[in-house]
Amino acid sequence: MRGRDEDTGEFFSPSRSQNRREALEVLALAEKLVALTEAQLAKLPVPEALLPHIRETKRITAHVAHKRQLAFLAKQMRREDEDALETLRDAMDENGEAARREVAAMHRVEQWRERLLEDGDAALAGLLDEYPQADRQRLRQLVRNTLEERKRNKPPHSFRELYRELRAAILGQGAGDEADHDDDTSPEQE
């Protein structure tokens, strides 16, 4: 029995209904994890202990056996730290903080790419002031190739390669600096 504190009237533990709701939330999270591809799973902060259970659940196709294995996976997930599950939910949530940071970083890289294509060496100097580890020669070559591709209506190979190079240079500094640069660079580029 859960009991009640005689002084305050509060219950000592959550109700059975609350425990069931929490268990069903974890089961829903387990279903979402099983639906993901291996590449998507690799991007998420899934605890190592859960990966074999997720793979086993994916492998089983018989309906009842799959359902039973999914319940077992949820049981294993409930044994994990609540912070780990919350981090996992946030990473999977489209509107989560991690998704917002990733989208902001992507927009920042795209803004730098457009600035480089429009302003040329002036934008490159600004980029190198902010991100000194960037490869000046490689970026200049990719900008020239991208402009040539556009002029000749060729497929955007260099355009994409420029994005990848900028992403490596900008996001290579680390996630801690990323949030600081987001606030600093956004108004200048608009």
Image: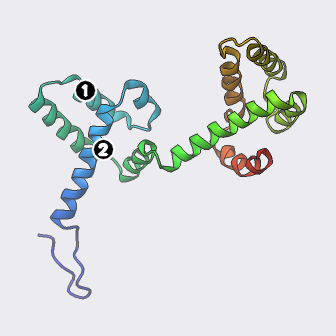
Identity of the residue drawn at 28% across and 31% down: 54
Kindly check if marks 1 and 2 are in contact, taking CB atoms under 8 A apart as contact.
no
Residue at point 28%, 40% (across, down) = 30
Q: CA distance from mark 1 to mark 2?
A: 14 Å
Q: Is label 2 in a helix, a strand or a loop?
A: helix
**Which quadrant holds the N terminus?**
bottom left
Q: 82 or 122, which is in the foreground?
A: 122
**Residue identified by numbered label 2:** 29
- Within 10 angstroms of label 1, few (less than 14), some, or many (20 or more) residues? some
| Residue 93 visible in this rendered orientation of the protein | yes
Amino acid beneath label 2: Leu
Image position of 142 with respect to 30: above or below: above
Q: Is residue 74 above or below residue 159?
A: below
Which mark is on residue 171?
A: none
Label 1 SS: helix
Residue at the image position 86 percent from the left and 31 percent from the top = 119
Is 90 left or right of 144, judged from the image as shown?
left
**Of the image marks 1 and 2, the number of the one nearer the N terminus:** 2
Q: Which amino acid does the dot numbered 1 rest on?
A: Lys
Is 39 placed left or right of 111 in the picture?
left
Query: Which residue: 62% across, 36% down?
Result: 106
Q: Nearer the viewer, residue 141 or 190?
A: 190
Residue beneath label 1, please? 58
Q: Quadrant of residue 76?
A: top left
